[in-house]
Amino acid sequence: MVYRVRFAAARALRVAASIVLLSPAAALAADAVASDEVVPVGSAPSGWLLTVRGNVIVTPNFPGAKDYGFIAYPSLSLRRTDEPEQWQAPDDGISFALFGDSRWNVGVVGRYQQGRYRDNDRGTLYGIHDAKWALEPGLFGEFWPLADTLRVRGELRYGINGYNGLVGNLALDYVQRVGNFTLAVGPRIAVAGSEYMNTYFGVTEQDAIFNTKVAPYKAEAGVKSVGLAASATYQWNDQWATTVRGGYDRLTGSAAESPITRNLGSRDQFSIGASASYSFQLGGNGWKR
């Protein structure tokens, strides 16, 4: 198993998301400074809860790879203290809800797609063109048909840098809270347009000349993978929580038939990871979950 760390691109996405997320808190603080009104103790605005997470995940080195590496990255989330905490799957994109309530949400989302580089594995990828990392901003929507128990979520994103095209994810999660534990499991479907497919699974004439293990191949848009994801979170107290996660995806369609997958990689894509989070209040009177 090959281990490596990619921080820069993932951190750039997380920092961009944190700027968006922290802007409401900044506006709230400015309003508080500008106001001359004396607010009695206990009646002040409830403030905001900022959650800081450290994440580590082991995943395939590139889409369709058979070797694995790990990625470590930070993430942030923000909500009002008077809003109920809503469960999120560890494999959700970084998202910020713009509209909705406890049953549904619509907003913006972003993900990071790691690239594929010959320098990472010259033996396997010799002669194969590089596929650069990409940022994937987009929109998401989710709905809870059974409050706090069953969630349906969809994402539609557009790739920037590594490729220029559409990708999407559909997830269904069964969520069960048992004491301090929150357990979740559910199926996953990933779809991708031809730009994504040919960037990460296509084989050019030049690739085939320099690497005799592959033949020229043009990938088509469609379902990229189907799979399953599961997670378990333990809430130690109002501030600290830890999560373990696991997932399995089976490549399908053009992604599965690509010579890169069949001859150099694997259709079976596993992932496992863990995170720790710390929550604290910004503004307001004391701690309040």
Image: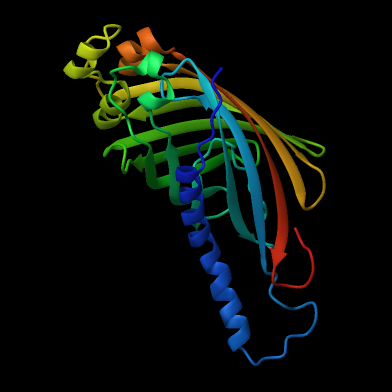
Residue 58 in the image: x percent, y percent?
58, 27
The quadrant the C terminus occupies is bottom right
Q: Residue furthest left?
A: 205
Residue 5 in the image: x percent, y percent?
54, 34
- In the image: residue 48, left or right of residue 240: left
Q: Is residue 227 above or below residue 111?
A: above
- In the image: residue 196, left or right of residue 187: left
All told, the count of numbered labels is: 0
The colour scheme applied to this rendered structure is rainbow
Q: Quadrant of residue 177?
A: top right
Of residues 273 and 115, which is closer to you in this image? 115
Q: Residue furthest bottom?
A: 36
Q: Residue at x 31, y 11 (%)?
A: 259
Q: Residue at x 33, y 17 (%)?
A: 126
The quadrant the N terminus occupies is top right
Q: Is residue 52 above or below residue 272?
A: below
Q: Residue at x 72, y 60 (%)?
A: 280
Residue 254 in the image: x percent, y percent?
30, 16
Q: Is residue 154 above or below residue 29?
A: above
Residue 142 shows in the view: yes
Residue 141 shows in the view: no
Q: Quadrant of residue 271?
A: top right
Residue 48 in the image: x percent, y percent?
66, 65
- In the image: residue 257, left or right of residue 46: left
Of residues 229 and 10, which is closer to you in this image? 10
